[in-house]
């Protein structure tokens, strides 16, 4: 019954965990105070992807109230 197992080898399984890890990291909400651009990033010390300004407000997505 090996067909029911989603991973044929360790490499695929490792890649799968890597993808989830990347998804978890890319959830920092960033807001540029200079141009007002908003985006999701993977790190808190972000530089605005639009204007290059470093005055960026960053909020972890899991800190948003869920009401
Ligand atoms: Zn900007």
Image (cartoon, grey):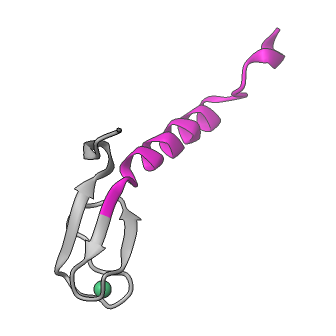
Location of ligand 1 given as a quarter of the image: bottom left
Residue 36 is left or right of residue 8, and the answer is left
From the image, give the main secondary structure of the stretch colored magenta: helix
> Measured along the vertical axis of the image, is residue 56 above or below residue 16?
below
Q: Nearer the viewer, residue 24 or 4?
A: 24
Q: Quadrant of residue 26?
A: bottom left
Q: Nearer the viewer, residue 10 or 64?
A: 64
Q: Pinpoint residue 55: horizontal percent, then vertical percent.
A: 16, 80
Q: Residue at x 72, y 25 (%)?
A: 6
Q: Residue at x 49, y 43 (%)?
A: 18
Q: Quadrant of the N terminus?
A: top right
Q: Reply yes or no: does residue 20 show up in magenta.
A: yes
Q: Pinpoint residue 4: horizontal percent, then vertical percent.
A: 79, 16
Q: Pinpoint residue 48: horizontal percent, then vertical percent.
A: 30, 81
Q: Quadrant of the C terminus?
A: top left
Tell me where the magenta segment starts and ends, as one range.
Answer: 1-29
Q: Pinpoint residue 19: horizontal percent, then vertical percent.
A: 53, 45
């Amino acid at each position: 019954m090996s067909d029911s197992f989603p991973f044929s080898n360790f490499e695929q399984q490792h890649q799968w965990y890597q993808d989830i890890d990347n998804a978890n990291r890319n959830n920092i909400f960033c807001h540029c105070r200079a141009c007002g651009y908003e985006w999701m990033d993977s790190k808190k010390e972000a530089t605005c992807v639009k204007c290059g300004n470093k005055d960026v407000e960053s909020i972890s997505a899991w800190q948003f109230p869920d009401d």
